[in-house]
Image (cartoon, rainbow, N blue to C red):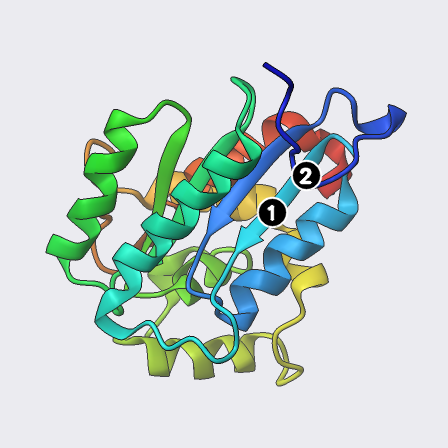
């Protein structure tokens, strides 16, 4: 059987690269973050599966992400060295909804999940400081706190990605329940994805 089209051309520089397929809800911060990683290293390739601008997910988000992931894998295939990741926030998903994806990941090789509680900004904060220093109680407060921590310059994916190794170390150290997929409040499992990326990208990420 001929090899399926993987959705991009592998030139000589990419023949040993690893593909990371990331399914998320299309939040601009997440997309820009992963695109910045993609730009920095020829050792890895990142494909973000996201909703189109006119798609409203709401309560159908878990099923949409799952269907999107299945469609991509069916069309392009994944090799044993490639991986698929669901990147989720607890504040948008109920635990029952998240459980749908965690169960699917357990049944599929190289399918993984990286959850932040309550939101992706917890992971971003860890690029700058240990999360214990945050005074925020919810995502809205945390977004404002991050803005102040960046001297009111706002979110810059390039600056954050350059600190991904520090963020990964802080996130792992602050994870108080490493045996469960869903982190406790003000914790993030994004370090699992970050560590996998860092393994292959190495010094390309700073």
- In this rendering, the answer to whether 57 lies above or below 190 is below
Please give the residue where the numbered disc 2 appears in the rendered image: 45
**Image coords of residue 24 (percent x, y):** 44, 57
Q: In front: 49, or 198?
A: 49
Q: In front: 26, or 169?
A: 26
Give the residue at the far left of this rendering: 96
Can you say which quadrant of the picture contains the C terminus? top right
Residue at 37% over, 69% down: 134
> Quick check: can you spot residue 122?
yes
- In this rendering, the answer to whether 28 lies above or below 105 is below
Left or right of residue 137: residue 5: right
Please give the residue where the numbered disc 1 appears in the rendered image: 47
**Image coords of residue 123 (percent x, y):** 44, 57
SS at mark 2 in the image: strand
- Asked whether the beta carbons under mark 1 and mark 2 sit within 8 Å of each other, the answer is yes
> Quick check: can you spot residue 162?
no
Left or right of residue 8: residue 74: left
Residue at 33% over, 76% down: 139
């Amino acid at each position: 059987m001929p090899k399926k089209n993987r959705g991009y051309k592998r030139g000589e520089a990419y023949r040993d690269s690893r593909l990371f397929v990331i399914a998320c809800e299309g939040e601009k911060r997440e997309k820009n973050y992963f695109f910045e990683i993609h730009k920095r290293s020829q050792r890895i390739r990142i494909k973000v599966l996201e909703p189109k601008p006119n798609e409203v997910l709401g309560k159908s988000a878990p099923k949409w992400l799952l269907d999107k992931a299945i469609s991509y894998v069916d069309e392009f295939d994944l090799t044993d060295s490639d991986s698929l990741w669901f990147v989720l926030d607890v504040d948008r998903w109920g635990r029952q909804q998240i459980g749908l994806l965690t169960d699917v990941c357990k049944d599929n090789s190289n399918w993984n999940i990286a959850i932040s509680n309550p939101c992706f900004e917890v992971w971003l904060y860890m690029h700058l400081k240990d999360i214990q220093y945050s005074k925020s109680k919810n995502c809205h407060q945390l977004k404002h706190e991050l803005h102040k921590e960046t001297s009111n310059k706002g979110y810059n994916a390039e600056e954050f990605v350059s600190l991904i190794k520090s963020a990964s170390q802080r996130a792992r150290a602050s994870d108080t329940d490493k045996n469960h997929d869903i982190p406790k409040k003000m914790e993030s499992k994004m370090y699992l994805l970050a560590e996998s990326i860092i393994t292959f990208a190495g010094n390309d990420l700073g």
